[in-house]
Image (spheres, coloured by chain):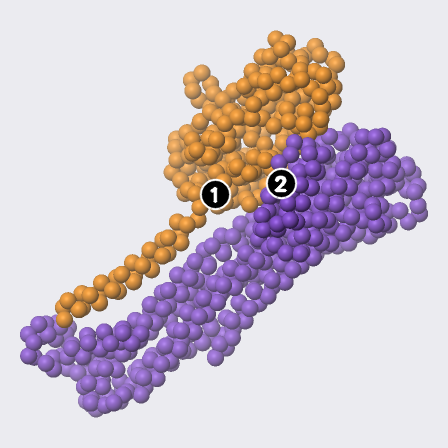
Chain colours: A purple, B orange
Amino acid sequence: MTGDTGRYRMLVTATPPAAPQEPPRRRPAVRLRRLGLQTTPERIRALAAVAVLAIVGFYIVANIAVGNARDGLRIIGHDAGPQVLATGDLYYALGDMDAQVASILLTGRESSPGAGQQELRSYSQDRATADRAALQAAELSAGDPADQEAVRSILDGLGQYERLVSQAMVLDKQAHHRAGPPPGNVIAVYRQATDLMTQDLLPPAYNLTLEGGATVREAYAAKRSAVLAGRLWVGLAGLAVIAVLAALQFFVVARFRRRLNPALAVAMLGLIVLAVSAVRLLSDEAAHLQAAKTSGFDSILTMSRAQAISDSMHADESRYLLDPGQADMYLLAYLDKSQTVLYVASADLSEYDTALSAAMTAYRANPRSVGFRGFYGDEARAHPGPAVTTVLARYQQFQADDQRIRQLVNAGQDRQAVRLLTGRTAGSAGYDFDQYNQAVVSIIGQHRATFDQTIRAGDRELERSVLGNWAVLLPLAALGVAVLVVAGVWARLAEYR
Amino acid sequence: MKRRRAAAGGWVSAVVALALGLSLAACSATGPASIVGRQTLRIGVKANQPGLGQQLPDGRFVGFDVDVARYIAAQLGVRPDHITFVPVTSANREAALENGTVDMVIATYSITPKRETKVIFGGPYYVAHQDTMVRAGDTAIHSVHDLKGKRLCQVTGSTSWERVTQELNIKAKLVPAASYSACVTMLLDGRVDAVSTDDLILAGFARAGTAVRIVNAPFSYERYGIGIRKGDVSGCEAVNRAVSQMYLDGTAAALLQKWFGKTGLQLDTHVPQFEGCG
């Protein structure tokens, strides 16, 4: 900074035609004279005008940069970000409704009077969650007719789905069947319901989540680099204003033989404070955007998708037992989804189980080398720690239970397989799945907290400055500096009147 | 003095150049060349699958995949005469993307977690189901499980045979072949007993008037993805938007009807659930 002002001092003090002994020095003076800047007041006025213009320039650059920070926070924290979370909730709730229905139909009605009650409660809760999340998603997508249309079509389809489900439930009750596959007429109605869910309702909900994720990714990339570039420009514009103010100060001091022009000095000080705080603000906002995106949003999206896909895997186990005619399809879907959630090279499910065990043993021995891919590979690499270790251990148990279920089926013990899958007590696959799901919910909650905290911190910083909101501070401070410049030269110019 | 002023000017322009350089560097550091913003596209399609991707004797490519490719290229802003179709096989699709022979693959390319380790998938643009085709006179095979002990055609690079002999553990005898059209020839002349792959592929051969029968016992979801070079996330997202649009404006339904309307297959005209761009 001092070096720069020093350089300008040499420039400026040399400019007036005070020292005619060196011929080349006359040239700028000649140029100034041609511009009509012959007298001292004209030159002061011209320099002051340049200073005010530089301040306006600084204001524009800073305003754009702060605006980019504000937009980034709005899109990621209050707009597309929350919409992704809402549509993610919608997707999970819809998928879980179908999972609960499969479980109810599989359990049958004869086993115990309370059978299926918990699943029915979950089904109603899911229905309420789906409504709430759909409403929220529709509100957040107010500006996008295509998104709103997608949400509306999901809700329309949901009514139709519910009619099919109640029809299947009534037929199932009438059949009064043992635990295991219900009669053909129940399966036929359920197939219609689950096809409607998986072909018409779930895809638009999932695609809305992905589309929102893409919007967040693009906004993040664009806004963060704009904020960082803005920081550089704000710094340069601040230096330019300071240089012009210094020039003005030295010119006035030299011409009027005063020590210091106080108004100009205060203006310069004010601008230094303003420029430094703006640069600091922009650095902080870029950091908040980065933390919200990489430590919060990305992991929420990854883990929410893992949770929803795991839930549909659990439902595929029920459907595998419920609908023997489609068992191959559900078995292969389960394998594909397993490899999406956690990828280890394997040709079939039992190989997958073996490869998973090996990968987990290696991971526990050295959590820093993650020898698997998929959603959990990403999460384990991005956020190693006890939370992800718990999720992985419970996922492994979930897969081990799946092997037991399929072994029972292959041995012809279908009823034991159903009991193992739908059980709720410790040691049953149903219990283990609930434990696994809770671990995923808890890790999503942690990332959600990080996301909310960083967005709140970013918002607070935009509002918290000496004068309150930056939207107010910036124009006021710029105006203040400009007024000081005018006031500083006004009194000197008055001496010529 | 003059020299000093010039030095100061040089200093300022250096800073400006540095700033511009920094922002340009930030722009170019987003991964491999994207399929977004391209003037031309090389798209890998199959050359010998009737109804999906077929090269006619005059060199033109026709089929559902080819039409989908044209639509997506148009959505990406590429003029029809700036698309080059490149024939690919099941075995060389990943390599063609990785070594840059093609920019995009639309060639009955099922999304699998294993392939996702090498490429990324836009879409799926359609979800097909694997089924089994036998000779018209064959009455012994009614489901994929009846393939136990039978000779099944094995196309290199395709995952269809893996579904049967590995994932479902059905002990069929595998007979290697280079393509599904080769499989159909082998089925007709008795070198294999069955061809098992996606219903859309089988429907194309069945429609061609050959003496074959599809057993109509589908057993998997085959999500046809649009293969893109790994890392091109914005390209993948743009492709997904194009696929959404294709279903929204009715093009998908029209194309499915055009190529498979007469096959008797149940065609799903709802937008599929996308895989996600990573």
Q: Is residue A3 visible?
A: yes
Residue drawn where x is 76% and y is 47% of the image: A433
Total labels drawn = 2
Q: Quadrant of residue B90?
A: top right
Please give left or right for residue B148 compared with residue A482 in the image: right
Label 1: how many residues lie within 10 Å, few (<14), some (14-19) or many (20+)? many
Q: Position of residue B164 (x, y in %)?
A: 68, 25
Task: Give SS at disc 2.
Answer: loop
Disc 2 sits on a residue from what chain?
Answer: A
What amino acid type should be assigned to the residue bearing mark 1? Asp
Q: Mark 2 highlights which residue? A: A343
Q: Quadrant of residue A359?
A: top right
Q: Mark 1 highlights which residue? A: B232
Q: Of the residues tagged 2 and 1, which is closer to the observer?
A: 2
Task: Give SS at disc 1.
Answer: loop
Disc 1 sits on a residue from what chain?
Answer: B
Q: Quadrant of the C terminus of chain A?
A: bottom left
Residue drawn where x is 73% and y is 49% of the image: A394
